[in-house]
Image: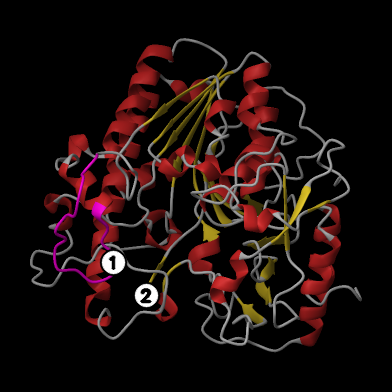
């Protein structure tokens, strides 16, 4: 048996033809949907990038216990379990966060791995001194502009190199058995850097400043006239993603990998392109459907099922599903569900699920309603990181953060290890001058209001979701102070 995961970053469900978009150009995603089960109710668990990837490895939520960080010594890693049990696992990625302090323990869980350089601000090519930046709106960084000098044609762009390596792996290994290939690109993550020929398909003329990298904030008056331009840039980059997807599908056809190969096409989260008058996925706002309701396509050669699936699934289900596919037991600490029967016959695996990011709101959905619970305490406390790997995204925890740490007792999933309990200081970034958080408790009826434009009041539904939150948090052995912070200690 074999398996391929094609993973994108910030892939918007509502911008794909299989999910109803009529203006972008995604014919290979349509081709994919003809072969696969297309999930209509797939939700994230933990956001953003590395917390989501930790869930793909471990099959459990990240955000209840710590912020962005590496794999922990006690974590069960799906690709490492495969490696230790005779299934070759290979990672190809241009997602440069893997090579930073906060992601540096992921790639070594695979049998082998390839990193492709040059995305966003990847510290790749050296340029001593200043660099003149072009007139621009939004973000524009020196390192990114230097990198673009070396990725000035499509064949040199990091995404292209990544998928070429994926094709090369299939050409070399298609006849072998027992392997898992993860082809992962940073695209269509911002900045939406594309070649002119792709943009021309959506926009033949543009005379404004460079604007392909919106910040994580409200759409400003300066940016407002250019919102459609940014969407066009995203659509152009998405078209490139679609074209490279087609190259993998071509190889599956050529080698008839549909006979024995599972295919998963997924993402970590979405991205706001001016919807709700916001950009990106800022921790300051509610994580709307555009961010948390994600595309997912799975082909299982055992059932060869295709079509739509309304069952509620999450990122944490991917690790158990892959382990079961290769005939391996699922570790007890993995709380995601095996999707074999969900794929084959639409068997539900859950009624509700949680999602969120560390230190912000906690949300719960059943696919009909979305309930967003704000911290009950205005200072958003108490809040701690629990870890044995004290690193943030791009740096280790500074000594100042470590001076008052405590040792916690083991959690149910830490293999008997006590953890460092460190005050979470990142939450302060979003507080006002009084140290108060900006979050609101909201309830949306997704069936009547799929764009979440009008919050509703329904005490009975809200009470149901509060109880579900407590149930799922207990199942995940959430820290006790999380119930206090969220006002759930009474439940």
Q: Which residues are magenta?
A: 126-142
Q: Is residue 235 above or below residue 88?
A: below
Q: Is residue 208 above or below residue 242?
A: below
Residue at 38% x, 38% y is 94
Lower position in the chain sequence, tag 1 or tag 2: 1
What is the residue that sits farthest to the right in this orientation? 490
Image quarter in which the N terminus is found = top right
Q: Is residue 220 above or below residue 306?
A: below
Magenta stretch: includes residue 138:
yes
Residue indicated by mark 2: 274
- Residue 32's spot in the image, x, y percent? 41, 41
Residue 400 in view in this figure: yes
Q: Is residue 402 above or below residue 137?
A: above
Q: Is residue 194 left or right of residue 246?
A: left
Residue at 28% x, 86% y is 221
Helix, strand or loop for disc 2 = loop
Q: Main secondary structure of the magenta part?
A: loop
Q: Is residue 293 left or right of residue 147?
A: right
State how the image is colored: secondary structure
51 or 198, nearer to the observer: 51
Residue at 61% x, 32% y is 303
Question: Alpha carbon of mark 1 to alpha carbon of mark 2: how far?
Answer: 9 Å
Q: Is residue 278 left or right of residue 438?
A: left
The quarter of the picture where residue 254 lies is: top left
Residue indicated by mark 1: 231
């Amino acid at each position: 048996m074999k398996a391929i995961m094609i993973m994108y970053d910030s892939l918007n469900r509502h911008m794909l033809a299989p999910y109803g978009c009529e203006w972008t150009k995604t014919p290979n995603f349509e081709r994919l949907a003809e072969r696969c089960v297309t999930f209509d109710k797939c939700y994230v668990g933990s956001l953003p990038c590395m917390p989501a990837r930790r869930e793909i490895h471990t099959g459990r939520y990240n955000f209840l216990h710590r912020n962005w960080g590496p794999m922990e010594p006690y974590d069960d890693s799906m690709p490492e379990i495969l490696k230790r049990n005779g299934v070759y696992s290979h990672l190809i990625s241009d997602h440069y966060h893997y090579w930073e302090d906060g992601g540096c323990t992921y790639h070594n869980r695979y049998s082998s791995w390839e990193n492709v350089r040059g995305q966003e601000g990847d510290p790749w090519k050296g340029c001593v001194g200043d660099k003149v930046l072009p007139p621009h709106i939004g973000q524009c960084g020196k390192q990114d502009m230097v990198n673009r000098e070396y990725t000035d044609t499509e064949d040199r762009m990091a995404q292209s190199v990544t998928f070429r390596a994926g094709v090369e792996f299939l050409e070399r290994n298609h006849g072998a058995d027992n392997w898992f290939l993860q082809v992962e690109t940073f695209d269509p993550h911002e900045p939406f850097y594309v070649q002119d020929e792709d943009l021309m398909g959506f926009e033949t003329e543009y005379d404004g400043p460079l604007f392909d990298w919106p910040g994580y904030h409200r759409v400003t008056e300066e940016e407002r006239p250019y919102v459609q331009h940014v969407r066009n840039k995203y659509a152009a980059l998405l078209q490139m993603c679609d074209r490279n997807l087609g190259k993998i599908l071509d190889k599956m056809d050529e080698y008839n990998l549909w006979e024995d190969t599972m295919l998963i096409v997924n993402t970590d989260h979405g991205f706001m392109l001016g919807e709700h008058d916001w950009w990106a996925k800022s921790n300051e706002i509610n994580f709307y459907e555009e961010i948390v309701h994600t595309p997912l396509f799975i082909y299982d050669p055992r059932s060869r099922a295709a079509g739509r699936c309304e069952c509620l699934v999450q990122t944490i289900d991917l690790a158990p599903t892959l382990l079961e596919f290769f005939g391996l037991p699922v570790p007890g600490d993995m709380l995601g569900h095996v999707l074999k029967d969900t794929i084959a016959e639409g068997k539900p695996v859950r009624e509700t699920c949680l999602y969120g990011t560390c230190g912000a709101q906690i949300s719960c959905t059943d696919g009909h309603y979305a309930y967003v619970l704000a911290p009950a305490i205005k200072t958003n406390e108490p809040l701690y990181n629990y870890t044995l790997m004290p690193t943030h995204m791009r740096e280790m925890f500074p000594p100042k953060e470590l001076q008052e740490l405590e040792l916690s007792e083991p959690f149910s999933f830490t293999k008997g290890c006590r953890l460092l309990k460190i005050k979470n200081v990142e939450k302060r970034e979003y507080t006002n001058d009084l140290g108060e958080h900006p979050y609101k408790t909201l309830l949306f009826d997704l069936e009547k209001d799929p764009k979440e434009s009008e919050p509703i009041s329904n005490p009975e539904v809200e009470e149901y979701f509060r109880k579900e939150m407590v149930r799922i948090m207990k199942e995940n052995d959430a820290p006790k102070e999380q119930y206090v912070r969220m006002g759930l200690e009474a439940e």
